[in-house]
Image (tube, rainbow, N blue to C red):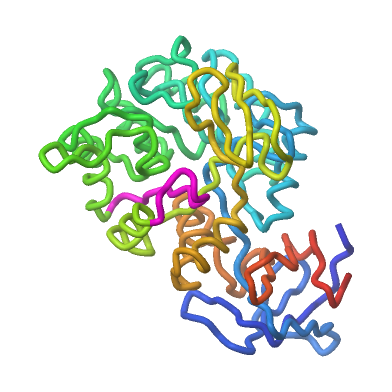
Amino acid sequence: MAARAKSTVLTGGRVVLPTGIVDGGRVIVEGDRITADAPADAVPLDLSGHWVVPGFVDMHNHGGGGASFTSGSVDEVLKGVRTHLEHGTTTLVASLVTGEADFLAQRAGILSELVEQGDLAGIHFEGPFISPCRKGAHSEELLRDPDPAAVRKLVDAGRGTVRMVTLATELPGGIDSVRLLAELGVIAAIGHTDATYEQTVEAIDAGATVATHLFNAMPPIGHRAPGPIAALLEDERVTVELINDGTHLHPAALELAFHRAGARRVAFITDAMDAAGFGDGLYQLGPLAVEVKEGVARLVEGGSIAGSTLTLDTAFRRAVTVDRLPVGDVVRAISANPAKLLGVYDRVGSLEPGKDADLVVLDAEFAVKGVLRRGEWVIEPPQLG
């Protein structure tokens, strides 16, 4: 990374703040923080013609750059983090796919050290407590019911760094596990589920607050049996994850979810696997073989979609240019909302004095031209490069 300037004033750009968009705004960076006042020796940086937005926050990500968070070495995990960082994701949660309980506990122990070092924002278990009916790219023989004792064991293995657990809450032990997670301050996410509408409502009432990649790996909406999607969209307590890659969701489905839930209840995620930022080819997702072709990841056996190759800058650009969503709403969905869910909004997720100097510079076509993390340029804007 480039050396950080003592103090820099970013001027001239379209700055997206929690209160709105400021044309010709300025962001003052001193050390690793955003500040309110610029010292006399601050270095100016003209970003006219560019957008300045908060660093992206990805709360559901399995890897990238050829590296897997489920099975990679520490160096490989850091390579995956760096890959997404170069695409604007300055805060990232490492997601683990289904595996043997002892193996997952071991991985949690390894990843927890990276959380403690500040390289990761937390750990997410997307298995093994999910429905075999909606397993997606998870190994069916390794699935198990969400027994609270087993859930507690995995959470404890993370030493306070587990931020979210995805559950099929209709399975035996599901509701009790939701209550346990709520007591522990861990997000209980409903996903890979075959639940009815009524069972989903019960889980939300018990404390579930997130829908894992809404629409995917759950029953579709029916006019007599509305299923989990309707329950998750209608409840103000639930934030819905959306994978905006053009493969996981039809634009009409994304529009339905975004406008039914509202901008404050959507979190754009990648659900990325190893191939994100790396290319087509054969990969492993946990114990399962995956083929990536033309950017779409599918299981070699069965053809189910197996995560994505998405990066959040692509999700941002698609949301604005294809889905025609307001930039301010997209920033909420890609930065502020996930930061709030993860409990880190006091440090990241918006451009406000006192917060970490995490931001992304985008050109007029919403391509990444600069990435700043904790006051250091990961990608330098053209004027600095």
Q: Residue at x 72, y 35 (%)?
A: 77
Q: State the residue in front, 49 or 15.
A: 49
Q: Is residue 122 above or below residue 128?
A: below
Q: Quadrant of residue 363?
A: bottom right
Counting from the top left corner in percent of width and height, residue 292 is at: 63, 33
In the image: residue 313, left or right of residue 59: right
The relative height of residue 27 versus residue 54 in the rendered view (above or below) is below
Measured as percent of width and height from the top left, residue 152 is found at 43, 23
Image-quadrant location for residue 1:
bottom right
Is-magenta flag for residue 119? no
Taking the image as shown, residue 334 lies to the left or right of residue 176, namely: right
Task: Residue lying at the far top in this picture: please name it.
Answer: 141
Which residue of the protein is positioned furthest toward the front in this rendering? 294
Residue 94 shows in this picture: no
User: What residue do we see at 73% from left, 34% from top?
Assistant: 66
Location of the C terminus (image quadrant): bottom right
Query: Please, what is the dominant secondary structure of the magenta stretch?
Result: loop
| Residue 6 shows in this picture | yes
Quick one: 101 or 170, which is closer to the camera?
170
For the residue pair 47 and 373, the one nearer the viewer reads as 47
The structure residue drawn at horizontal position 53% and vertical position 17%, both measured from the top left corner, is 301
Q: Quadrant of residue 64?
A: top right
Residue 335 image point, x, y percent: 53, 60
- Which range of residues does the magenta coloring cover? 237-251
Q: Residue at x 72, y 33 (%)?
A: 67
